[in-house]
Image (tube, grey):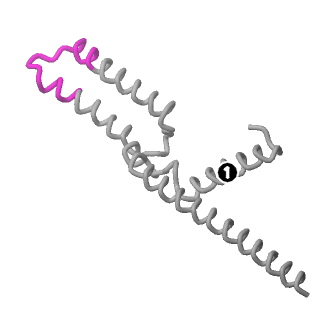
Amino acid sequence: MRDEVRSCCLRTTNGIRRFTAFVISHVGLCFLVAIYAAIEYPNELTFQGHIKNDTWVVVDGLYAFIRENVVIEESEVKKKAHELLKEFEQELVKAVNFEGFDENDDVRTKYQWTFSGALLYSITVFTTIGMSNEGLGVC
């Protein structure tokens, strides 16, 4: 009888320990994801719409150049327009290659790091690391 009670207590204790570890790890995971999404959100806002603003910088720069000159020569305006458009082109290439810009960003705001996306990413990382520690996966 004593061994049965001890066995039942051990099973209950192990079950409670596993349940507690499961809950704490998932709550901790959600907490870390929320912090990560909160940290990343302001950075996402700085990127949204900056190409649209850069377009107006080109237009305003060209108008300012025309206003500053008393005599407007076609070749000078073309040269300045080419210079401003070249700068814009470099900013656009940088935005596409390194900031994830696509043509829909100015029409509809699309954030790269949402809470659900960050959660999916972190679960993928944790499960991949867990599998490699058990010898089931290769990282």
Q: Residue 11 or 136: which is nearer the viewer?
A: 11
**Which amino acid, mark 1?**
Phe
Q: Is residue 43 left or right of residue 53?
A: right
Image position, residue 129 (x, y; %): 70, 46
Q: Which residue is label 1 attached to?
A: 126
Seen in the picture, residue 112 relative to 5 is either above or below; the reply is above
Outermost residue to the left: 70
- For the point 71% across and 70% down, the residue is 17
Image position, residue 5 (x, y; %): 85, 84
Image position, residue 25 (x, y; %): 63, 62
Q: Could you tell me which quadrant the C terminus lies in?
A: top right
Seen in the picture, residue 72 relative to 111 is either above or below; the reply is above
Q: Which quadrant holds residue 53?
A: top left
Outermost residue to the top: 75
Q: Which quadrant holds residue 54?
A: top left
Q: Residue 15 or 31: which is nearer the viewer?
A: 15
- For the point 67% across and 51% down, the residue is 126
Element type at mark 1: helix
**Residue 11 belongs to the span the image colors magenta:** no
- For the point 78% across and 78% down, the residue is 12
Q: Residue 113 or 5: which is nearer the viewer?
A: 5
Query: How many numbered dots are placed on residues in this image?
Result: 1
Q: Could you tell me which quadrant the N terminus lies in?
A: bottom right
Q: Is residue 10 left or right of residue 1?
A: left
Q: Residues in magenta?
A: 62-80
Seen in the picture, residue 3 relative to 91 is either above or below; the reply is below
